[in-house]
Image (cartoon, rainbow, N blue to C red):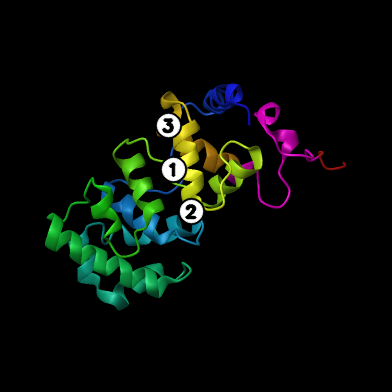
Amino acid sequence: MKDQDVDPFFATLRAANPLPTSELEYTSVFELLVAVLLSAQATDAGVNKATRRLFPVANTPQAILALGPEGLEGYIRTIGLYRMKGKHLLETCRILVEQHGGEVPRDREALQALPGVGRKTANVVLNVAFGEPTMAVDTHIFRVSNRTGLAPGKDPYAVEMKLVERVPEEYMVDAHHWLILHGRYVCVARTPKCWQCAVIQYCDYQPKTAPPTP
């Protein structure tokens, strides 16, 4: 993607969705952390289904610890890899209580020290909860960045660094939401819906996908 096309690419996405938000449901920073931790290799809809049952019962580190492994698993067993995620979540809650007063730290190093919290999850929490201009590269952003030519890279970290370099400052806080939603609903994995794409004129992908035959 040409440098002069990056600004209008994001301006177009912003015009279509001025206030993008996460599709994960949460009402606190801790709930967001839990939802993102549970969302690895799972859909947001599947996570929301589980947390709608979990959060009314336990939405603090102390309350989740009180559930114990079996109690927690009863709420999250519909999510893929639930046993491992439950173990990580309980250990994360223990660390939050013992080392952070039960609060989610606003610090990348501290976040990434939590079990089950990698760079992507830390970036989501820093961005969505604290408004920091981070870029959480998931499979959708990785695909869109490479396919469009916006930020080509061989791995998520390379794409993240390229996006941080190329995305204009005024778009950075919301950029990862726009890219995720674009990848989830338009620039999909198997057959991108180029005929529905608002930013097609800036995209390097060839050949563009034709609309389906009626």
Tell me: 150 left or right of 113: right
| Region rendered in magenta | 183-209
Q: Which residue is mark 3?
A: 172
- Measured along the vertical axis of the image, is residue 38 above or below residue 26? below
Residue 155, how many percent across, how many down? 53, 53
Rendered image: mark on residue 99? none
**What kind of element bears circle 3?**
helix
Residues tagged 1 and 2 counted as in contact (Cβ below 8 A): yes
Furthest residue to the bottom? 70
Residue type at numbered disc 2 = Asp
| Residue 202 is covered by the magenta coloring | yes
Tell me: 55 left or right of 141: left
User: Which comes before the other along the chain, label 3 or label 1?
Assistant: 1
Residues tagged 3 and 2 counted as in contact (Cβ below 8 A): no
**What kind of element bears circle 1?**
loop
Q: Which residue is mark 1?
A: 22
- Measured along the vertical axis of the image, is residue 82 above or below residue 203? below
Residue 79, how many percent across, how many down? 46, 67
Residue type at numbered disc 3 = Met
Q: Which residue is mark 2?
A: 44
User: Which comes before the other along the chain, label 1 or label 2?
Assistant: 1
Residue type at numbered disc 1 = Ser
| Residue 111 is covered by the magenta coloring | no
